[in-house]
Image: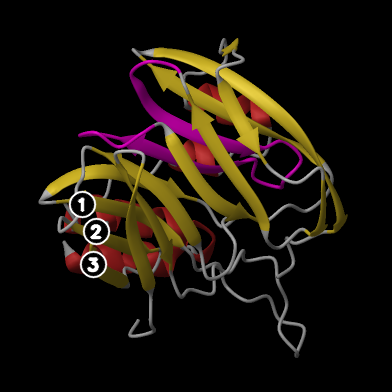
Amino acid sequence: MHHLRRTFLKLSGAIAAGAAASFLKVGNSLAATWNKSGFESKVTVEALKSLSASAATPSREIAISAPDIAENGAQVPVTVTSKIANTESISIVVDKNPFPLSSTFDFANGSEGYVSTKLKMGQTSNVIAIVKADGKFFTASKEVKVTIGGCGG
Amino acid sequence: MAEPMRIRAKMENNAADVKVLMSHPMETGQRKNEKGDLVPVHFIQSVTAIHNGKTVLDAQWSQAISRNPFLGFRVRGAKAGDKITVNWVDTQGDKGSIDTTVVA
């Protein structure tokens, strides 16, 4: 098994991340299945499809807190709060990034529909939040203007 | 990865407000080093938070999370003295873990 994985890694550097993902699935029970197709999507439409969220309903109960203008695209603070009952997960998509899907946060056992992080943004873009609640999908977005892109470092 | 992480959990409106700083390069695979060679992709893929033995947050990340990642989340029903643990795993299988006790 181990040998197989190693061969797989050697075969293609380009899919090394994917190989590591399958390694995680086998080797670490903590790790959720990494959404490879979503994270490797190059357009938002495909990323949303990977989340089954293509038909997400716009909602005012999702608040995205992010700067209107980010001077440094390497560190853009983004906080998403969902007031929708039974929020199960929040995903954050940066529409114009080379790989738009940045993260998915699954909540359980009392954690609130709230997450705060810092993202890299290559250029001015809409930041889109996708909320899953009771099996349904909701969305909100906010434009962040980026003066110096942050995808190179 | 034996680099330091930081964590803090403080009660706020009947929830533990947890803030975590991880130490990680979060390489996108698009950055070039001084020699002009591409630095291989290397980032934290999975983050799990545990409150008193129960998973409360399971996150999947891409390389778009900033270097030395920041994560904030809230655990409802937590109380001072409870234990919060955060674990991560990166694309190379390296792991990190930190825990703290919720303060009032």
The magenta stretch spans which residues?
A: A84-112
- For image coordinates 24% across by 50% down, the residue present is A25
Is residue A107 depicted above or below B54 in this figure?
Answer: above
- Tell me the mark number nearer the camera, choosing from 1 and 2: 2
| Residue A148 shown left or right of residue A106 in the figure | right
Q: Position of residue B77 (x, y in %)?
A: 21, 37
| Residue A69 shown left or right of residue A18 in the figure | right
* Residue with the mark numbered 2: B102
Is residue B63 depicted above or below B6 in this figure?
Answer: above
Crowd around label 3: few <14 · some 14–19 · many ≥20 (10 Å):
some
- For image coordinates 33% across by 56% down, the residue present is B10
Which numbered tag is attached to residue B99?
3
> Is residue B30 inside the magenta stretch?
no
Q: Position of residue B78 (x, y in %)?
A: 21, 44
The foreground one among B93 and B72 is B72
Q: Label 1, label 2: how many angstroms apart (C-alpha)?
A: 12 Å
Query: Hey, what amino acid is under mark 3?
Result: Asp
Query: Hey, what amino acid is under mark 1?
Result: Ile
| Quarter where residue B95 is shown | bottom left
> Is residue A106 inside the magenta stretch?
yes
- For image coordinates 38% across by 75% down, the residue present is B5
Which numbered tag is attached to residue B30?
none
| Residue B59 shown left or right of residue B70 in the figure | left
Chain identifier of the residue bearing label 1 in the image: B
Chain identifier of the residue bearing label 2 in the image: B
- For image coordinates 59% across by 55% down, the residue present is A118
* Residue with the mark numbered 1: B50
Crowd around label 1: few <14 · some 14–19 · many ≥20 (10 Å):
some
**Which quarter of the rendering shows the C terminus of chain B?**
bottom left
Q: Are marks 1 and 3 on the same chain?
A: yes
| Quarter where residue A56 is shown | top right
Q: Label 1, label 3: how many angstroms apart (C-alpha)?
A: 9 Å
